């Protein structure tokens, strides 16, 4: 396993991280389709991941209404010091009007509840799971800074925010000398590359780590689906859901999948392994989160850390999935062509 620095901290995290969204939820109306693993299965997956060198594990309080956190806490057990533990808050976790969002009231309640469920007295990376249009960022960031100063949280991060929202948050934290986001958890894959327009450049400029969720588009990029919608594995997340949580251009997705299969055959590995290796080769990506229901899926995903794609592989995949350049990016790129004097080494 290889390790990369988490943002501008000195903390090393594994470039493959374990997502715990598949833990629990057997009787949940939504999460029973996402995994519904029992405790014994979760124990095996966590143990296998840690033994393989994974030290970065991610969950959220909304996953199976907190059951994921509870099961993960039990699975980690005495190996807590081996884990950089991340969780998230924002979504509803109860019937009350204040059981959601990013108000100081909910941040403090949610933190205490997550600590209890995870059986720990600190969380290494506490992330806001989305943008709260009702709560000022100043209030949220102040509450998170207090949690850091209290020692209950080591670092803070965000997920699913637009570039301007992340940038505004970083500015507020700098203005008030508060803890700043060190990471941004994003949806990214060889077939869904919207983040390259704004979020990737922002991460590079601000020194943020990018951690990636749904790198395989719910199983679509594993190669188990054909253009007729037929799958070779009815147990895949995409087949169980009956819909795509991440919206994407399916025809473009199949174009990317064709290239993934070609590259995979060249290296004698799975398309899924190639997709993850491609992400690990992209700018600002620190860790790719994999969530498995079966040990063989997990071990195959972990092996992506040892796969080095060639320049030909990367070029072919880039060409297949490259998004159109949006404004103002295209005019800035056009203008930049004349900014370097002839003969310059720049």
Image (cartoon, rainbow, N blue to C red):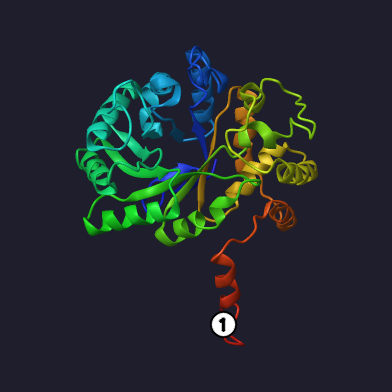
Q: Position of residue 164 (x, y in %)?
A: 41, 56
Picture quadrant where residue 63 is located: top left
Q: Is residue 87 left or right of residue 291?
A: left
Q: Position of residue 219 (x, y in %)?
A: 65, 32
Q: Tally the marks.
A: 1
In the displayed structure, 108 sits above or below 316; it is above
Q: Is residue 121 visible?
A: no
Quarter placement of the N terminus: top right
For label 1, the SS is: loop
Q: Residue at x 34, y 37 (%)?
A: 124
Depth order, front residue of 50/227: 227
Which residue, given by chain and number where applicable, does mark 1 sit on?
340
Q: Position of residue 318 (x, y in %)?
A: 69, 55
Q: Is residue 143 visible?
A: yes
Picture quadrant where residue 273 is located: top right
In the displayed structure, 124 sits above or below 312; it is above
């Amino acid at each position: 396993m290889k390790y990369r620095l988490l943002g501008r901290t000195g903390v090393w995290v594994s470039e493959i991280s374990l997502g715990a969204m598949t833990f629990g939820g057997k009787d949940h109306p939504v999460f029973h389709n996402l995994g519904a693993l029992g405790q014994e299965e979760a124990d095996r997956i966590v143990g296998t991941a840690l033994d393989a060198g994974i030290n970065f594990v991610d969950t959220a309080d909304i996953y199976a209404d907190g059951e994921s956190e509870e099961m993960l806490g039990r699975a980690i057990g005495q190996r807590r010091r081996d884990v950089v533990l991340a969780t998230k808050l924002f979504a509803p976790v109860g019937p009350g009007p204040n059981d959601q969002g990013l108000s100081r009231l909910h941040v403090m309640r949610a933190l205490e509840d997550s600590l209890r469920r995870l059986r720990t007295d600190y969380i290494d990376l506490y992330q806001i799971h989305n943008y709260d249009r009702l709560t000022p960022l100043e209030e949220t960031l102040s509450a998170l800074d207090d949690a850091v100063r209290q020692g209950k949280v080591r670092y803070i991060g965000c997920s699913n925010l637009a570039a301007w929202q992340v940038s505004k948050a970083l500015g507020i934290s700098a203005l008030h000398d508060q803890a700043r986001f060190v990471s941004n958890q994003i949806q990214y894959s060889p077939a869904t590359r919207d983040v390259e327009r704004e979020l990737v450049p922002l991460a590079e400029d601000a020194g943020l780590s990018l951690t990636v969720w749904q790198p395989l588009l719910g199983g679509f990029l594993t190669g188990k689906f054909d253009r007729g919608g037929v799958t070779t594995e009815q147990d895949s997340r995409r087949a169980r859901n009956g819909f795509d949580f991440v919206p994407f251009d399916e025809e473009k997705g199949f174009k990317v999948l064709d290239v993934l299969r070609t590259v995979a055959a060249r290296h004698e590995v799975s398309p899924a392994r190639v997709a993850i290796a491609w992400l690990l080769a992209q700018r600002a990506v620190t860790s790719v989160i994999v969530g498995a229901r079966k040990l063989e899926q997990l071990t195959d995903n972990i092996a992506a850390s040892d796969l080095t794609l060639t320049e030909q592989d990367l070029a072919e995949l880039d060409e297949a999935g490259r998004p159109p350049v949006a404004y103002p990016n295209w005019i800035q790129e056009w203008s930049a062509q004349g900014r370097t004097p002839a003969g310059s080494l720049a």
